[in-house]
Image: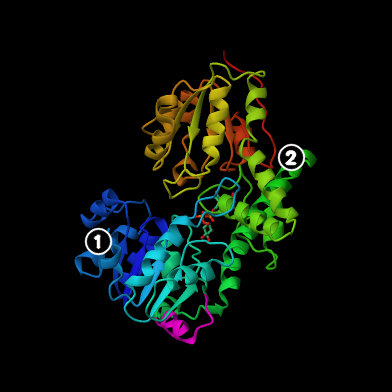
């Protein structure tokens, strides 16, 4: 099938590449000339494990192309995916200007019946708005379908090729058949394509992300309480996660969720609720708790240094909002660094993938290390912000030699408090026993 993907950001690039891999001819369109030039010359513009192999293969075999020309890109396409950004407005609602602009331009370009697919996360009712914009200038029949993506960064290719479910919002039989055909290779193993109306599909995406953000936040509050009552959140997680009604996943307490989706989507859903006269109280609490959770380790860090961080050298392991991505959007690391710098601390950070992106934001306000251990040289304490595997089993003898104080503040619960106690570290984590070692070196 011939398809077009408008927008070559994270979602668009994965969508386009994966549909090419299943034998379709895909043209990706983007207004960013620099980006399109890079893509045309075979450079993958995002970090996503497993994407490069598919990308190269499909370019070579002529199934994947890139252009800045919308008319050329959509010519002959049976399905057009809109994978455009929907950044939050000042008031938190999703800004639809990019999507609606493109919809308006699409109308006169359609030459035959076309399915236009909203792939971006868009507020309930957007499919109808897009339909109305295209219809202003369209001469042929078309349908607008909502097909939200549930890709996780870092495992996006796998999520796309083997989704647990595909959600398609359309009431058109014609569009339904085409979407079924397109996704057939992805649901071979029996996972469902769930067809529903457009509004329910749009709502499904927000409900899924808001639910997961709430699940994490609930666990973070349980962790905060565990600390006060002397319980261990790891044990509690195991205890409740084995109940299949709760499930094992997304129960890891830490310094909060970040990324390009959860914060934005929770905010947008709260806004939708407000606009519809509904006070969605849980979501408000989730946003507030998550914000506070991000810098939760700071008071313990200050206390360790007798109340002031002035002049203290703090090593940071992990900058991305989660492992296997270079994405630092809404990353807890950035919130922490902001506070540390305000308090007069000196920060040296290491991340396997995200340092370039942080340099674009913070420049030389912090120092960057070339290895995990490099960040520790002469540092007064170590903070862990992201659970990259490389941080999981360090040589603690080396850590001890390099750090001025044996002090670790772990926002991702990577180590066992008991083991850290035996090794003589001052170790603070989330929702578990605090291991206190009083001595501080000046
Ligand atoms: C998420 C959704 O999972 C995906 O379906 C949607 O399409 C986009 O948003 P992503 O942002 O890539 O994907 O990250 P995800 O792996 O879901 O993690 C989100 C955040 O939650 C991260 O900051 C992560 O560190 C945090 N998290 C996750 C926890 O704090 N605890 C957990 O148990 C799980």
Q: Where is residue 102 in the image (x, y as percent from the top left)?
A: 40, 62
**What stretch of residues is rendered in magenta?**
169-181
Query: What residue did someone put label 1 on?
Result: 56
Q: Where's the N terminus, which quadrant?
A: bottom left
Q: Where is residue 25 in the image (x, y as percent from the top left)?
A: 28, 73
428 versus 441 height, above or below: below
Instruction: Name which of mark 2 and mark 1 comes first in the sequence.
Output: 1
Residue 173 part of the magenta segment? yes
> Within 10 Å of the Cα at label 2, are there few (<14), some (14-19), or many (20+) other Cα atoms?
some
- Choose between 52 and 200: the one closer to the eye: 200
**Residue 39 visible:** yes
Secondary structure found at label 1: helix
Viewer-nearest residue: 20 or 413: 20
Q: In the rendered view, would you say 95 is above or below 316?
A: below
Residue at the far front in the pictured view: 136
Residue drawn at 69 percent across, 53 percent down: 283
Quadrant of residue 360 within the rendered picture? top left
Identify the image's colour scheme: rainbow, by chain, secondary structure or one colour: rainbow
- Main SS, magenta residues: helix
| Camera-nearest residue between 127 and 323 | 127
Q: Decide which of 77, 181 is in the foreground and name it.
A: 77
Discs 2/1, front: 1
Q: Mark 2 points at which residue?
A: 227
Relative to residue 74, is residue 45 depicted above or below?
Answer: above
Give the image location of residue 93, x and y in percent.
59, 53
The answer to whether residue 218 of the structure is visible from this angle is: no
């Amino acid at each position: 099938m011939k398809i077009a993907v408008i927008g070559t950001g994270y979602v668009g690039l994965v969508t386009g590449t994966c549909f090419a891999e299943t034998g379709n001819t895909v043209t990706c369109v983007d207004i960013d000339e620099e980006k399109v030039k890079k893509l045309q010359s075979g450079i993958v513009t995002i970090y996503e494990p497993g994407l490069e192999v598919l990308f190269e293969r499909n370019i070579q075999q002529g199934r994947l192309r890139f252009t800045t020309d919308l008319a050329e890109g959509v010519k002959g396409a049976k399905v057009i995916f809109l994978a455009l950004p929907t950044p939050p407005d000042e008031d938190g609602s999703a800004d639809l200007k990019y999507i609606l602009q493109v919809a308006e331009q699409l109308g006169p370009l359609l030459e035959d019946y076309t399915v236009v697919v909203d792939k971006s996360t868009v507020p309930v009712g957007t499919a109808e708005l897009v339909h109305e914009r295209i219809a202003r200038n369209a001469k042929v029949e078309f349908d607008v379908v909502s097909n939200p993506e549930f890709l996780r960064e870092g495992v996006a290719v796998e999520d796309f090729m083997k989704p647990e479910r595909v959600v398609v919002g359309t009431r058109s039989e014609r569009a339904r058949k085409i979407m079924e055909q397109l996704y057939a290779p992805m649901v071979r193993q029996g996972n469902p394509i769930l067809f529903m109306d457009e509004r329910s599909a749009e709502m499904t995406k927000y409900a899924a992300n808001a639910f997961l953000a709430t699940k994490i936040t609930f666990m973070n509050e349980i962790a905060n309480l565990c600390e006060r009552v002397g319980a261990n959140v790891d044990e509690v997680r195991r205890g409740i996660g084995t109940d299949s009604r709760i499930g094992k996943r997304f129960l890891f307490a830490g310094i909060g969720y970040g990324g390009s989706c959860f914060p934005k989507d929770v905010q947008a859903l709260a806004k939708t609720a407000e606009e519809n006269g509904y006070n969605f109280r849980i979501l408000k609490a989730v946003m507030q708790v998550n914000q506070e959770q991000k810098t939760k380790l700071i008071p313990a860090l200050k206390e360790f240094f007798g109340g002031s961080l002035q002049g203290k050298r703090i090593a940071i392991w992990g900058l991305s909002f989660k492992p296997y991505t270079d994405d630092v959007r809404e990353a807890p690391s950035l919130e922490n660094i902001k506070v540390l710098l305000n308090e007069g601390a000196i920060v040296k950070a290491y991340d396997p993938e995200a340092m370039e992106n942080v340099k674009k934001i913070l420049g030389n306000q912090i120092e960057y290390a070339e290895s995990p251990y490099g960040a520790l040289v002469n540092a007064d304490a170590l903070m862990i912000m992201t659970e990259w595997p490389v941080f999981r089993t360090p040589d603690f003898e080396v850590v001890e030699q390099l750090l001025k104080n044996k002090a670790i503040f772990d926002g991702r619960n990577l180590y066992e408090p008991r083991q850290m106690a035996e090794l003589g570290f001052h170790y603070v984590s989330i929702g578990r026993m605090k291991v206190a070692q009083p001595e501080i070196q000046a």
